[in-house]
Image (cartoon, grey):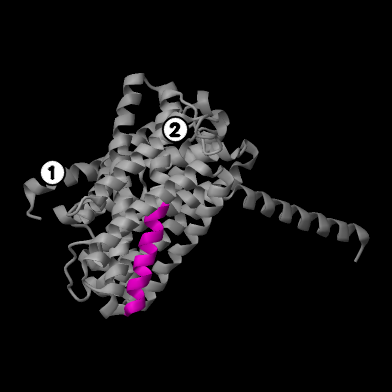
Amino acid sequence: MSNALLVKIKQKLASKWAKLAILMAIIGPGIITGQVDNDAGGIATYSIAGARFGYSMLWTLIPITILLVFTMNITTKTGIVTRLGLAELIREKFRIKLTLFVLALVLVSNMGTTISEFSGISSAVYILGKQIGGETIFWTTVLPIIGVVLSGILAWFVIVKGSYKSIEKLFLTMALFYITYIISAFMAGPDWSAAFKGLLIPTLKFDSAFLFTTVGVVGTTVAPWMYFYLQSTAIEKGIKKEDLKYSQIDTTIGGIFTDIFSFFMIVACAATLFAHNIPVNNVGDIGLSLAPLAGEYASYLFAFGLLNASIFGAFILPLSTAYIICEALGYELGMNKKFGEAPIFYGIFTAILVIGVITVAIPGMPLLMIMRASQVANGLVLPFFLYFLMKIAQDQALMGEYATKGFWRIFGWVSVWVLAILNVALLIAPFFVQS
């Protein structure tokens, strides 16, 4: 082998290793955002989809995944190209009244989702407590409240005292634990041929319960908060235009794995709760019902996965809200800043945390309804956010050569209209059919 050929081989290998090193440095915002989509409300929504409709809703994950990856990609692109957060861009491109309208929608949907995260923590601790200690008041009532309060304190210290780099490493580690839902699904012993049939053959029903759950599945997977958080963290991480393709690998991986985990959540509950016609009144029912049907460890895995996902979401939802409001109103922001440097940013984060903890700590709160309703609310407001995102992404004055055009521009606008029609169908279905 000639020296010239050896040199070329070494150069190619060096180039591949250099590209891999860049990718590993860039990875983070997309994977984290994607996995937090499978938060407490998401787990509740997917579990209900499987428990009540079996495998018949799995097909929705295919178009939702395509939409999720597309929107995550254009979100990071607009942030990296403009160096502005989405809330800032909405303020710059649209009138202040419209910006305030967007802020109001964000506050309502994010507050509901944050409460759902603490609802998930409470439900997870309830499942574990009942499995360990039985029906006593301490294990089923007191311990969940303690878990919620301690999780809120943990979230505050991690975000306020940490830096972006250290927090990102923690979040990436937490994202690994979603594998518990894959294990739970296999332990449930599903009918895989029926599952893949449900994935590939669409089932449509003009039925209130089916449409409510469908909008919830869309809203939990393609949630409005994620666009703001993803764009803000991509900017804070300092990703540059020349690294855009690596950033989009990050978001593509994040989007795909989000719905791989969603698939297994639905399958686990379809194979157990739906197959045995077991009613579900709260999230605790889901976890506890897995024990006699798929083994005690399946119940523990479900509870642990729910706890991890809920704490993960309790970190990020208040953080996302703080980013959005501070961007829109021009306040200092960022995880790399100290409390004194960005008091409004951390003040908003703290306030959202406290409201979430207090709300869920109130005895008798309908936790499952909170979790499901928050995701449906996300689905209902989603078309508004997609509208703003598409208007910004296709703006050549802002985006230049990176402006969204051609097929993907058409795809984006068709998605806006399809989601709007789905929401209208949900709203009018009760007048035409009985749920």
Badge 1 density bin: few <14, some 14–19, many ≥20, Cα 10 Å: few
- Residue at image coords 31%, 35%: 107
Query: What are the residue bounds of the magenta stretch?
Result: 295-312
Of residues 331 and 408, which is closer to you in this image? Answer: 331
Of residues 168 and 63, which is closer to you in this image? Answer: 168
In this rendering, does residue 418 appear at all?
no
- Residue at image coords 48%, 32%: 85
Left or right: residue 432 compared with residue 318? left
Locate residue 354, reporting x and y percent.
33, 42
In space, the residues marked 1 and 2 are separated at their CA atoms by: 40 Å
- Residue at image coords 56%, 35%: 80
When asked about the image quadrant of residue 195, the answer is bottom left
Q: Mark 1 points at which residue?
A: 428
When asked about the image quadrant of residue 13, the answer is bottom right
Q: What residue type is labelled 2?
A: Phe
57 in the magenta segment = no
* Tag of residue 345: 2
Query: Is residue 64 depicted above or below 178 in this figure?
Result: above
Of residues 241 and 43, which is closer to you in this image? Answer: 43
Farthest right residue in view? 3
* Tag of residue 302: none
Which secondary structure lies at badge 1?
Answer: helix
Locate residue 254, reporting x and y percent.
48, 53
303 in the magenta segment = yes
Left or right: residue 393 compared with residue 164? left
